[in-house]
Image: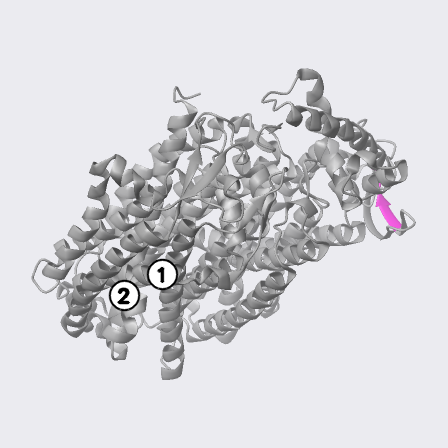
């Protein structure tokens, strides 16, 4: 077993590199689609200002994509480097969507991105438009497959444990792809990316309008961002609600922790708007509750109870006891070199993951005492105060984005975009969608703890067996390296925003030069 | 379910893994080679930018072969993905750092005019080519020696030895072979995609790199035959069994890595193609057939990767610590269901990928000239 230091450092490294990667991903998702929309307008209307917009936002897109691609490489390999047992244990299922992401999506995006930047004078305007759309489609499909993989960690369907190979194996690819958690997650996450892209375009355009620069480009950009942003912000919240419903059905502990709901309430459960959850006493102080709301969100009914944390811990205890029976069965099956599991052993073997929680307490889990089983059951509760607050801040931002984009949309449609209070508000709101997106990931992944695969494999068992010194080295390396790159990236972004779009170059000499290329 | 048995699926996936590695070496290989060469064939800012823009429109797509190789290993060979990347932890960290540096160096260098800024990114670009080229070769070298890992009975892997254990003379020779190979390939690409001084220097580098490659490849072959004992599965092999690497016995035998060429002499055509390709580069590099020289270089690169894969077969990752823990084609794959589904996905998407990659290369054909760089100072890299 890896030492706890190695597990904690691996978790920290994964969290930092993933959160850092997701600073660039949502902007790529949103901006690629906004570029495709702007270029479509250019091709349909033939007005050069729209091409100028595509080129200007495209330059910022290019700076961002370089960072997104660079930090994505780490993610593709980090499961192998730091989570070797996880990779062995679930690679049969989890690897497939990752590989298909490469085949179907990332290849498309990365191949055509070169043409997006270099193909302006080698393709017809329709040809270039198709290229831009392919980049946008590629990056969005990429998100789809990654989220299918991620959803499987939250709600592992379509798989079974095979004692002969000591790992989870695929039973139904269909179930993995059409995982209900994946459906809700994809739309929620992709829409969040569109909000980030819209806010980026809106804030920078607002800056230009405040300074009275590049007005033609800025007004048009802001109008596009306002409409696209409003639709996306609505979609994030509505489908975020769908995500909540799915969590209510499939990830009950997560939703109970988000709500700091210690006890099962009489349905329909109330929603706690404010409170100070206290994990020690298992109560929430100063709680302000709105009746019915949580019950409606999480169950879509008035009479289905939502189990509270204490009830879920009691259920986990039963799973652990059943899992210990499964663990005993597994020892027998392996001694007999069995390749199939008798039907009566399948239930207990399905709870094996719960029994493995005991490995953190003692290696010979078959001798666990009732007190140790209680402790293991209690360890299934994630960090309630962090989830409670991360979720509320994220949701608060979500509603704020709807309001802000609605105002922007109204002002744009009335041609009243020069309200300075609004432009300032839009400018200063720039970092908020990133903050909301990162908090969303904290809710999703920190809320999944102590599991790396919900109910199947505890996180501490998933880590590689590395020397602690190697972990410190790589962690420091990433922090140092990524911080430097962040400084450079922000510096370049600011520099290019300040420069603004280059004065529209006269087309003729450019084309002549290219003709001389022998093209 | 596909009407294909488990053993055949495993063989097909072994071949696909090889195809992905070859795709990576043949496409992104010239990007890495161009990065290694940049300080030597490009002596002023315009020439540096010619090198960057010669790979500019395609390197990003090329790199996906590597990402996809990682993803495909995860999906089709989970123990290989788990053991190799965690076993080569620090080496992998260096490769990742280099590959993270590369996109940033390419995209950011031209964004500011300051000479210091550009010089810094030039260094970063050079390192981002040299480090992966060297480490990939060293890693392949260590596959032949075996890596010090073992599984416990829950199939958890553990290691003895770290980064410096990898840096032994044989593995370093393989590292140098890899650098020579990619330098030749990058030079052939730059000869094709640039003009004037950069092209002239690249052609002469391509020629010399090809000659060095022929010599080093021969030395490596002799070393492998006489000084690196191979691994052999002892007894009957069940090619349809569930993937559990602990159910076999493996022994070490001198000269065993070259035994396939004795048993099937026609296989010697694969290393033979390395010689043919590299010799053609050495001859064609100075002439007018620049495309033919590049294609010959691609053949040599593909043949070297294939030679390594065939020599190791059926081993994917032998263990020096506990040879029975070695990963082979027959006991380190995904389940039959996963291999089948991934086969369908690959058969659908790989031809599409090759088609549109070909399209992009065609659209961007023709050399990058100094004049075009000067004309489009703000648009190009």
User: Where residue A298 sits: x, y (%)?
Assistant: 73, 35
- Name which residue lies at 61% across and 24% down: A337
Q: Is the magenta stretch mostly helix, strand or loop?
A: strand
Residue B338, above or below A44: above
- Does B109 sit left or right of B263 as displayed? right
Q: Which of B89 and A383 is in front in this view?
A: B89
Residue A246: quarter of image: top right
Q: Give the range drawn in magenta.
A: A287-291
Quadrant in which the C terminus of chain A is drawn: bottom left
User: Where residue A382 sits: x, y (%)?
Assistant: 77, 47
- Let me know if residue A219 appears in the view: no
Task: Give me the C-alpha separation between circle 1 and circle 2.
Answer: 27 Å
Residue A104 on the magenta span: no
Q: What element carries label 1?
A: helix
Residue B218, above or below B354: below
Q: Residues within 10 Å of mark 2 (few under 14, many from 20)?
A: many
Tag 2 residue: B53
Label 1 or label 2, whichever lies nearer to me, is 1
Do residues under tags 1 and 2 come within 8 Å of each other at their CB atoms?
no
Q: Which of A54 and A422 is in front in this view?
A: A54
- Does A353 sit left or right of A195 as displayed? right
Residue A164: quarter of image: top right
User: Where residue B207 sits: x, y (%)?
Assistant: 16, 65
- Dot 2 falls on which chain? B
Which of the marked residues, 1 or 2, is nearer the chain's N terminus? 2
Tag 1 residue: B175
Q: Which residue lies furthest to the top in this view?
A: A343
Q: How is the image coloured?
A: one colour
């Amino acid at each position: 077993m890896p030492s706890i230091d190695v597990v904690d450092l691996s978790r920290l490294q994964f969290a930092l590199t993933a959160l850092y990667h997701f600073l660039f991903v949502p902007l790529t998702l949103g901006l690629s689609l906004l570029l495709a929309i702007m270029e479509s307008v250019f091709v349909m209307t033939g007005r050069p200002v729209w091409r100028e917009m595509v080129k200007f936002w495209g330059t910022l897109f290019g700076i961002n994509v370089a960072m997104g691609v660079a930090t994505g490489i780490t993610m593709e390999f980090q499961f192998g480097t730091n989570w070797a047992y996880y990779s062995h244990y679930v690679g049969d299922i989890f690897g497939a969507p990752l590989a298909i992401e490469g085949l179907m999506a990332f290849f498309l995006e990365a191949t055509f991105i070169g043409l997006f930047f270099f193909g302006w004078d080698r393709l017809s305007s329709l040809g270039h438009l198709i290229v831009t759309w392919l980049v946008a489609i590629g990056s969005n499909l990429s998100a789809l497959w990654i989220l299918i993989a991620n959803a499987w960690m939250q709600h592992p369907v379509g798989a079974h444990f095979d004692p002969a190979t000591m790992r989870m194996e695929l039973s139904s690819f269909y179930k993995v792809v059409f995982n209900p958690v994946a459906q809700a997650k994809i739309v929620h996450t992709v829409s969040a990316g569109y909000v980030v892209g819209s806010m980026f375009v809106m804030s920078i355009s607002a800056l230009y309008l405040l300074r009275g620069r590049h007005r033609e480009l800025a007004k048009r950009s802001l109008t596009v961002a306002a409409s696209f942003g409003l639709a996306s912000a609505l979609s994030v919240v509505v489908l975020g609600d769908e995500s909540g419903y799915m969590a209510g059905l499939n990830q009950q502990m997560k939703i109970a922790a988000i709500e700091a709901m210690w006890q099962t309430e009489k349905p329909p459960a109330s929603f706690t708007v404010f409170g100070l959850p206290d994990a020690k006493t298992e109560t929430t102080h100063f709680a302000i509750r709105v009746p019915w709301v949580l019950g409606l969100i999480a169950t879509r009914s008035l009479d289905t109870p939502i189990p509270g944390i204490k009830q879920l811990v009691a259920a986990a205890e039963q799973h652990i006891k059943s899992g210990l029976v499964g663990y005993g069965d597994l020892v027998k099956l392996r001694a007999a070199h069995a390749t199939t599991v008798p039907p009566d052993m399948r239930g207990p073997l399905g709870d094996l993951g719960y029994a493995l929680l005991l490995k953190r307490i003692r290696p010979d889990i078959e001798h666990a005492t009732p007190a140790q089983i209680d402790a293991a059951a209690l360890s299934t509760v994630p960090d309630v105060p962090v989830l409670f607050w991360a979720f509320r801040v994220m949701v608060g931002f979500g509603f704020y984005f709807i309001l802000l984009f609605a105002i922007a949309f109204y002002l744009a449609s009335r041609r009243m975009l020069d309200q300075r209070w609004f432009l300032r508000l839009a400018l200063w709101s720039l970092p908020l969608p990133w903050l909301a997106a990162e908090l969303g990931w904290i809710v999703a992944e920190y809320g999944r703890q102590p599991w790396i695969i919900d109910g199947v494999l505890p996180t501490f068992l998933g880590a590689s067996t590395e020397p602690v010194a190697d972990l410190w080295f790589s962690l420091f390396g990433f922090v140092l390296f990524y911080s430097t790159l962040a400084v450079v990236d922000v510096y370049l972004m600011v520099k290019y925003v300040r420069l603004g779009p280059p004065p529209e170059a006269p087309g003729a000499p450019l084309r002549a030069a290219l003709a001389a290329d022998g093209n | 379910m596909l009407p294909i048995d488990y053993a055949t699926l495993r063989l097909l996936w072994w071949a696909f893994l090889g195809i992905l590695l070859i795709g990576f070496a043949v496409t992104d290989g010239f990007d890495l080679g161009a990065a290694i060469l940049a300080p030597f064939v490009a002596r002023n800012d315009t020439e540096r930018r010619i090198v960057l823009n010669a790979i500019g429109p395609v390197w990003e797509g090329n790199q996906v072969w590597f990402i996809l190789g990682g993803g495909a290993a995860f999906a089709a060979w989970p123990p290989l993905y788990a053991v190799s990347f965690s076993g080569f932890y620090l080496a992998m960290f260096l490769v990742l750092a280099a590959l993270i540096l590369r996109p940033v160096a390419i995209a950011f260098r031209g964004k500011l005019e300051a000479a210091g800024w550009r010089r810094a990114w030039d260094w970063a670009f050079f390192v981002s080519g040299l480090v992966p080229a060297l480490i990939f070769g060293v890693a392949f070298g260590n596959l032949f020696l075996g890596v010090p890992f073992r599984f416990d009975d829950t199939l958890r892997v553990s290691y003895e030895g770290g980064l410096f254990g990898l840096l032994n003379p044989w593995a370093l020779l393989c590292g140098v072979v890899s650098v020579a190979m990619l330098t030749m390939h990058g030079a052939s690409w730059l000869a094709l995609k640039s003009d004037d001084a950069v092209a002239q220097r690249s052609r002469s580098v391509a020629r010399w790199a090809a000659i060095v490659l022929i010599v080093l490849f021969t030395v490596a072959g002799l070393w492998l035959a006489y000084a690196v004992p191979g691994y052999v599965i002892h007894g009957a092999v069940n090619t349809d069994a569930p993937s559990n690497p602990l159910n076999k016995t493996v022994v070490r035998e001198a000269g065993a890595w070259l035994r396939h060429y004795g048993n099937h002499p026609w296989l010697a055509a694969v290393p033979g193609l390395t010689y043919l390709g590299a010799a053609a580069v050495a001859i064609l590099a100075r002439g007018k057939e620049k495309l033919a020289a590049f294609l010959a270089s691609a053949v040599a690169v593909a043949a070297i990767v294939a030679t390594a894969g065939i020599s190791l077969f059926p081993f994917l990752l032998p263990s020096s610590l506990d040879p029975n823990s070695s990963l082979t084609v027959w006991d380190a794959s995904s389940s039959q269901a996963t291999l089948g589904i991934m086969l369908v996905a690959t058969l659908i998407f790989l031809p599409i990928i090759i088609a549109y990659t070909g399209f992009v290369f065609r659209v961007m054909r023709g050399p990058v000239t100094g004049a075009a760089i000067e004309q489009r100072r703000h648009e190009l890299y």
